[in-house]
Structure formats: C-alpha cells, structure tokens
Amino acid sequence: MPPAATKYILLVGDGMADYPLPELDGKTPLEAAKTPFMDRIAACRIGRVRTIPDGMPPGSDIANLSLLGYDPSVYHTGRAPLEAGSMGVTLLADQIAFRMNLVTLDIRSENDIRMVSHSSGDITTQEAQPLVESLQAEMIIPGVRIFPGIAYRHLLVWDNGPETAVTIPPHDVLDQNISDYLNDEARNPIPSLIRQSWDILKDHPINTVREKKGLKKANSIWLWGQGRAPALPPFEEKYGLRGAVISAVDLLMGIGFYAGFERIHVEGATGYLDTNYQGKAERAVQALERLDFVLVHVEAPDEAGHNGNVKGKIQAIESFDQKVVGTVINGLARFDDYRIMVASDHFTPICKKTHTSEPAPFAWAGGKELESAPGGPGFTEKSAEDSGLVFEKGHDLITAFLDPTHYIRGEQ
C-alpha cells in the first residue's frame, strides 16, 4: 500500500486528445494550445494508456473506470447505471437503467431522420427541467420512470427492461440518417419509446422560445447505455486511500458513488466551456487536506470535440491547463509529499465528432521532481507516443502512479 501521508490527484481533461488538423497547420488542438503546466508534468514522465479494452466501445464510462484501476471487462455493466448512482437512484435487481439524452432531430420524412445534436445545442439544466417534467407527466408507461439530471443528460429506469436491446450513442451518429434504426419498432422496443416523446416535446413552450432565439429544439429523447447496477470494490479497499471525485457529469459522480468516493459538487460546474474550472481545482486542494486521493474531471474539451469546435477545444484545453492544473500545482505546495497526474481519458477527434479507441496520453510527476522539472517536448499526443511508454492494460496505470515501488512500465 502507498504511504497515506502522500497526496494524490488525477486531473482528467475529457477527450483532449485529437488528430492533426489542416486548419491548425497540421497540429492537434493539444499542440496548438498553450499548456505550460501540463508541459511541466510531461517533462517528468509521459506516456500512453489504453483505457478502452479491445472489443469494448470507446465510452467515457469505460475509459474512466480504467483510469481508476477497475478493469472494464470485469466491472462495466453499462453507462446509465453509473449515472443512476450519482443521481441517488437505487437500482433493484430487475431494473435496467438507460441514459436519456434530450436531442435535436431533423425529421424530414419517415425515411430521412437526421441526428442534428446529441445535446440539443447544449441545452441548459434550467431549460431541460420543464421538458423532463412534461415527459414524466405524459409518458405513462407501466414499469418506466424518468429522473431529471443535468443539461441534456437524464435517466430512464425500466422494470425488467430490455437489457440487450440495440442502442446507439447519439454522438456516434451525428449528421447521419438514423431512420432505419427508428423504424425498427417490430424488433426493438427502444424506437417506440423515443417516438412517444416527439408529440410531447415538439411544441413545448421551452422549444418555442429556443426556436425564436435561433437555438436548437430539444424535440426528442434518445435512450442508450443501458445496464444493471455494478458491483465495484471500494477504492479504499483496493488501494488504502480515501478518495473524492469532482465533476459536472453524472457518469463520473456515479463511478465515484460505486467506488466509495466522497462526491464534491462545485457551484458553476456546467460540463461546458463556461464551467467553473478554478472552483473545481480549489475544492480539490481543500479536499486533500482531509483525504488522500482526488479525481477532478473536466468535460469541456470532449463537448467541443463532439461539436467539431476547434477554437472551443483549444480554449477548453487552455482553461483546463491554467485554471485547473496550474491552480492545483500551486495549491499542492502546502503538502510535504504529493503526486499529480494529468490524462485524456480517450480521443475525441474534431474530424469524427465522436470517441476513438487508441491509447491516450497521460503524464505524472512527484512533488520534488516537478519542482525541478527540466524542459521537454510538452504534453501532446506525439510526445506521448515518442516516449515509448504505454500501458496496454489501462487499469494498471493507477497502480504505478500510486505506488512507484511497484512501478509497472507497461508493454512497449
């Protein structure tokens, strides 16, 4: 077990990793962004980690389970059950949880239905609440209950629901014709539920106002990521460390719930570019006064990637570096011994607007080596690849980070 006096912090910039872009003269957003604090950490140690096991979809649920040392092939039961845990929804043995997005569809005809936005154009929680309340009141289906979440992310729980039904992450089919899926009601019960939401949402006052403002309407629900409650061994039991998680996203807070973490909510944490970066960092350092390990997760780079927003992704990365990583590094100086890691949980390439599975960059440093860090190539996808260090089993990375006496170099 690592010494309890050491403080550990893991900072995740969701989906930061990307591909070279012509509009950035062949650079990635990470290469184009100014990231002096992550570069300092990378000067000490940088590499890549395969957070998505072969054959599993490249979701943030799977990736972040890996980063916390939980083998997804053993512990992953679906994304929605994790989010249910964050929302305080206890799943019974026969209940299946589904993520319920509020999305924007372009319904041109029965044979031409397009996924315009997986997030209803970044709808706010305040706008989403009355929409979800209308769905709760009017979608009366035996054994089905809807629970409100944050922004476009909500939850549907179905007694004895179709656990093996075919579902599709909406961010995987942006700008695509999804009519074949939605017309397959005879073999799949999910499209029928989705269609029931259309009349409820179509002329809702919230959507009328959004349309007048030139904003995207939340004119459909979308169900995906289903599963039963997982059984994660507590993080403290595995590693002897008391931990906490800070995130605007129910998924990460749900992983924290099942891992036995304290869940810290930060005012102004939105999951978008306007999130309270510095507030997250300050609360993390405060938490380390009484705890051993903190995970800080920032969603903004991933959202920019899904939206194909190059400028926004660079902005999110720079804000993450300055306001989160920089604030944390300065705050850690009060502790005698600490270790800090930054990581992209997966790639979210601008050109694809969805996640991909290749190993993602990480970097870590201990307090003393960080104070005297030499110059280096920076925290980029290429420098991570050039290092030659790769953890092919992503769940092994945390062991090496927490306990350098059992350093696992990984497979080259």
Image (tube, rainbow, N blue to C red):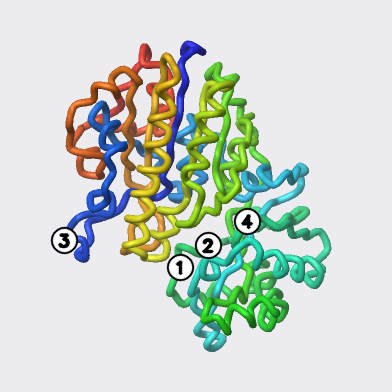
Q: Circle 4 — which element?
A: strand
Mark 1–mark 2 Cα distance, whole angstroms, equals 8 Å
- Left or right of 2? Residue 369 is left
Question: Where, quadrant-wise, is the C terminus in this rendering?
Answer: top left
Percent of width and height locating residue 348: 37, 54
How crowded is the residue under tag 2: few (<14 C-alpha within 10 Å), some, or many (20+)? Answer: some
Mark 1–mark 4 Cα distance, whole angstroms, equals 22 Å
Which residue is disc 2 drawn over? 168
Residue at the location (76% across, 66% down)? 133
Where residue 319 is drawn, which disc sits there?
none
Which kind of residue does numbered mark 1 sit on?
A: Val
187 versus 376 height, above or below:
below
Disc 1 + disc 2, Cβ < 8 Å = yes
Q: Circle 2 — which element?
A: loop
Q: From the viewer's perspective, is the residue at label 1 or at label 3 nearer?
A: 3
Percent of width and height locating residue 259: 60, 31
Residue 2 in view, yes or no: yes
Which residue is disc 4 drawn over? 150
Disc 1 + disc 3, Cβ < 8 Å = no
Q: Circle 1 — which element?
A: loop
Which kind of residue does numbered mark 4 sit on?
A: Ile
Q: Quadrant of residue 11?
A: top left
The earlier-in-sequence mark between 2 and 3 is 3
Which residue is disc 1 drawn over? 173
Q: How many marks?
A: 4
The earlier-in-sequence mark between 4 and 3 is 3
Mark 1–mark 3 Cα distance, whole angstroms, equals 28 Å
Which residue is disc 3 drawn over? 25
